[in-house]
Amino acid sequence: MHTKKYLFSLALSATSLMCFAQANISPAKKQSKTIAITGATVHVGNGTVIENGTILFGNGKIISVTANGQVPQDDVMRIVATGKHIYPGFIAATTNLGLTEIEAVKATLDFQEIGDYNSHIRSIVAYNTDSKVPATLRSNGILMAQPTPQGGTVSGSSSVVQLDAWNWEDAALRTDDAMHMTWPVTLRFRGGFGGFGRPQQSPEALAERTQAAITQLTSFFAEAKAYSEMGKPEVINTRFEAMKRVFKGDEKLFIAADSQKDIVAAVNFAKKFGITPVITGADEAYLVIDFLKENNITLIVKQPHALPNNNDDDVNMPYKNAAVLANAGLNVVLSIDGYWQQRNLPFMAGTVTAWGLDKEKALSTITLNAAKAMGVDKTTGSIETGKDATFFISAGDALDMRTNKVEQAFIQGRDINLDNLHKQLDKKFSDKYTAEKK
């Protein structure tokens, strides 16, 4: 009897979850007519601003971007955007968007595998296009993302997706763009029986443990490189097979490292294997700027709304970090941990402008710079001739939460639906309480 009740309860919970996850916003249809948008201020994404700009696009591609451009008269749909702003679609870097739905429901979490070396894992095949979250991002101008696996030392491959698709095959802009790993670090605390319920470890023991992890990582890379240089192996090693793209340069290597010591060690490690890595996290990158410039390192910097790592750090350093690095000439990308906060990405870039970075450069940290880091800058990341028509129209400054109002958005020329669950709930209860007042 108890078993039957349990099974009924489980079935009811599953049904409720499926009802919550029902799709009610269909992906947009392919662009069928050439469109010209006129009169807007065009923020190209590469630092250039075009006043009273005209964007002409057809078949999902940008045909021309001009100031005071002439619009062909034949069979062209016109959108007048006088006084408004047009921005490239923002890109959410290193996120588990689409791999997580409800943090408290384990069945909806699909961003981490068991084990330390999971180079064979591909996030793209787990990307959920029916998630309710991407639609909330589109309403703030985030039109692309990089779903990224987490956990272990080598986590697996991310891919770049656009956020209006029927399935992961439709969504993919570039599959397996980067292999992600975390540099082994020495813990900054020591656990004891009273505090953490485990035997106390000395600093020497912790350092030895870290060195052992680095040795193991080096061995893994050395074996994988040797495997990649073989002909056709008799026995396929899926983990080493996945690393071939990294050694050939077809896939980038993203290494998570925060302290200056770990950043330098991670870069030197990659160089031994002929790889120029992208560093993610980069809390103390401002302390090794010259080293990073010498090695042409791109940085994926954490969100500025955070506390410093060390007690003696400048309390405002998280706010200033991206500006200091970008103003020094480094390619900087801004990111936010997790998935549901990604809708605040443009406002994080706005915060960076208040701490020393030019507004157009701040825009580049979530558009063209991100596209370069992911290897998709030839097709997206800026509003330029020949690239995908992926951009949006905002009534005001898109980096300011007070004025960001996305009125229309296009992904590869498709006029996408900007509705989402948040807007639906707002309307539902606004209608309810409006009706009660009458």
Image (cartoon, helix red, strand yellow):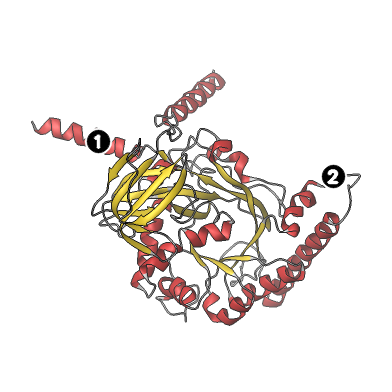
The image quadrant that residue 167 belongs to is top right
The residue that appears at 66% across and 47% down in the rendered structure is: 113
Question: Looking at the image, which residue sits at the far right?
Answer: 234
Identify the image quadrant of the C terminus. top left
Question: Looking at the image, which residue sits at the far left?
Answer: 438
Q: Is residue 55 left or right of residue 96?
A: left
The image quadrant that residue 296 belongs to is bottom right
The residue that appears at 51% across and 59% down in the rendered structure is: 370
Can you give x and y, in whole percent of width and height, for residue 363 in the image? 41, 62
Q: Is residue 284 left or right of residue 77?
A: right
Label 1 CA crowd tier, 10 Å (few <14, some 14–19, many 20+): few
Q: Secondary structure at mark 1?
A: helix
Residue 427, disc: 1
Residue on which the image places disc 2? 236
Residue type at numbered disc 1: Lys
Which of 26 and 108 lies nearest the eye of the viewer? 26
The residue that appears at 47% across and 28% down in the rendered structure is: 18
